[in-house]
Image (spheres, rainbow, N blue to C red):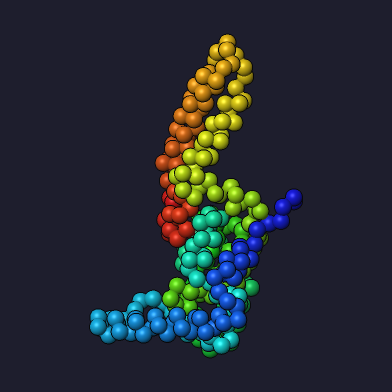
Amino acid sequence: MLFPRTNIEQKLNKLKDKEFDANTWRDQLEQIFKKDMDHEERILQNLGTKSKEVINNFNFDILESQHIYHLDQIKKTCIDYRLRFLDSKYFKGKLPVSAVSAIKELEKIHQTEINGFKIIAPSKLFKLENADDPLLFAPLGNDYFYLIHKWGNDLHPLRKRVMWFFKSFENLLVLTFLVSLLLTFMVPNGLFSKTNDTTTFIMIFLFMFKSVAAVVLFYGFALGKNFNTAIWNSKYFNA
């Protein structure tokens, strides 16, 4: 293959390195967690209720910093590569033995029972069996997640560039414009008019643009498709 395949774990690490100082990551996390826990305790005392958020009792002294990610980093990566970040109960693929072993080993090291598993994977993996780079996470609390295990194949190296067109409506318009322009150039000379002037070209382009846009809209509505920013954490099939 001309280009190397895309490793999502490496992309997450690159994004995290821009935001965290690896030398003081433990102090940063402890300060964030302590401040947030004090705030939550005060609110819970006032309300007299318990939080429903799953927080695993990990020993932070032995956690590996390179496996800790914030929800914002996960969200950006999922949007860029059109992936989903959902509860493991929605995952329809088969968890490999290595993933189960990784969970058992982590529970043994931290002397705790891990709950609230999340998985990053392409949309189709939450409906069909496949093997494209799933990542298994456990929540740490405060929108932080710990990467437990990664299996399967890396993503295609051009996936991010291709999926850019589906990030938003504006990006999709760019794709529609480019496809329409390509189709316009493919029209044989003299097919619609004896003259090949600018006016004729624009008229053919507008015709192509409306046709391509109609196909895109029909496809989108017929199959219930949506943009990357809307589906990255959606549990619904027709998204």
Q: Is residue 170 above or below residue 32?
A: above
**Measuring 63% from the left and 57% from the top, which residue is drawn there?**
155
**Measuring 66% from the left and 53% from the top, which residue is drawn there?**
157
Task: Return the x and y of residue 131 as percentages of the image width and height.
Answer: 62, 59
**Measuring 53% from the left and 40% from the top, which residue is drawn there?**
175
Give the farthest residue toward the right: 2
Nearer the observer, 185 or 49: 185
Task: Return the x and y of residue 110 as percentages of the image width and height.
Answer: 55, 87
Nearer the observer, 55 or 35: 35
* Residue 160 seen in render: yes
Q: In screen coordinates, is 60 left or right of 230?
A: right
* Residue 92 seen in render: no
Q: In screen coordinates, is 90 left or right of 40?
A: right
Nearer the observer, 87 or 82: 82
Q: Is residue 11 above or below residue 41?
A: above
Q: In screen coordinates, is 54 left or right of 15?
A: left
Total of numbered circles in the picture?
0
Task: Return the x and y of residue 192 as percentages of the image width and height.
Answer: 54, 15
